Image: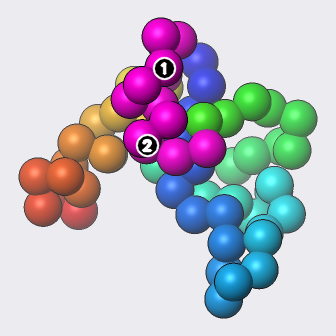
Amino acid sequence: MPCVIKYDHDDGKKLPAHKQELWCGKNRTGFDWCFQDAQHAALADKPICNSCIANIKKALDGKD
């Protein structure tokens, strides 16, 4: 299932795919398809990584 990108920029510079942070904590290989952010994932009709969903919900609840 596709993951959701948490951070893909640092100090205004786009990070390479292997340095981008995902909500679930997995490492990107650069060839995997990910949602750009939580808003895009929420609007999608595709399945989303369950770990990403759980961590996004924790952050929204203030438990991050």
- The quarter of the image holding the C terminus is bottom left
Q: Residue 3 vs residue 62: left or right?
A: right
| Magenta-span inclusion, residue 29 | no
**Residue at the image point whose x is 78% and y is 69% from the top:** 15
Give the residue type that dot 1 points to.
Ala
Q: In screen coordinates, is 21 left or right of 47?
A: right
Where residue 10 sits in the image (x, y, percent)? 66, 81
Between marks 1 and 2, how big is the CA–CA gap?
10 Å
Under circle 2, the secondary element is helix
**Label 1 packing within 10 angstroms: few (<14), some (14-19), many (20+):** few
List the residue tagged with mark 1: 44
Tell me if label 1 and label 2 are in contact, CB under 8 Å: no
**Residue highlighted by disc 2:** 38
Residue 63 location in percent, x, y?
14, 59
**Helix, strand or loop at mark 1:** loop
Residue 45 spot, x, y in % from top left: 47, 10
